[in-house]
């Protein structure tokens, strides 16, 4: 399996974004890497490795069951695998490409835009956002749409609320 990565090096930062598989053809992984890197920069996470796993319904159900004791498909699951004794952060985000394809078709936008939402959602959880209460969820989803608009993916979450 080829790991695709992008390094951003400066004297004070090292941001590495990795996908666990090659492009499926209709997904611009470079654009998604740029988005993930920008979110890390915006939230001042300068020394980080972000591993993004692309999976299907069956794969995410297995992860959901194993780590969260839930037996259903979901869009994204994120983990902070950082070592408390190391300054570098280590994030893992698992996104459900199969669900993204269904949602993108239903809402008439690209699979890439739907995956961008999942990646931003996972990263926001990892930098401290939560969506357990209605107020927290509204705040988080507003931030998601702002980030996605700023990176030319458009309004994705609010579109979901409007259409269906």
Image (cartoon, rainbow, N blue to C red):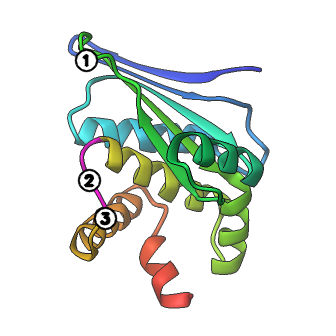
Q: Majority secondary structure of the magenta segment?
A: loop
Residue visible at 48% across and 71% down in the picture: 156
Res. 81 in view: yes
Residue indicated by mark 2: 129
Residue indicated by mark 3: 132
In the rendered image, which quarter contains the N terminus? top right
Q: Is residue 130 magenta?
A: yes
Q: Is residue 63 above or below residue 112?
A: above
**Please, what secondary structure does the residue beneath circle 3 have?**
loop
**Location of residue 48 in the rendering, given as x and y in whole percent from the top left corner:** 35, 23
Q: In this view, does 37 lie above or below 105?
A: above
Left or right of residue 68: residue 25: right
Disc 3 residue crowd, few under 14, some 14–19, many 20+, Cα 10 Å: few
- The answer to whether mark 1 and mark 3 are in CB contact below 8 A is no
Q: Give the range drawn in magenta.
A: 127-131
Q: Residue 84 carries which label?
A: 1
């Amino acid at each position: 399996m080829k790991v695709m990565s992008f390094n951003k090096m400066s004297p004070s930062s090292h941001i590495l974004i990795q996908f666990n598989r090659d492009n499926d053809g209709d997904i611009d992984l470079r654009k998604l890497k740029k988005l993930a890197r920008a979110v890390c920069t915006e939230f001042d996470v300068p020394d980080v490795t972000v591993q993004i796993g692309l999976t299907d319904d069956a794969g995410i159900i297995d992860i959901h069951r194993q780590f969260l004791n839930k037996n259903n498909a979901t869009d994204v699951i994120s983990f902070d695998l950082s070592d408390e004794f190391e300054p570098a952060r280590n994030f893992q985000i698992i996104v459900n490409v199969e669900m993204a394809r269904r949602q993108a078709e239903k809402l008439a936008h690209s699979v890439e835009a739907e995956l961008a939402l999942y990646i931003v959602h996972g990263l926001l959880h990892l930098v401290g956002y939560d969506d357990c209460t209605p107020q927290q969820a509204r705040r988080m989803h507003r931030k998601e749409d702002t980030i996605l608009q700023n990176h030319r993916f458009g309004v994705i979450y609010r579109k979901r609320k409007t259409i269906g």
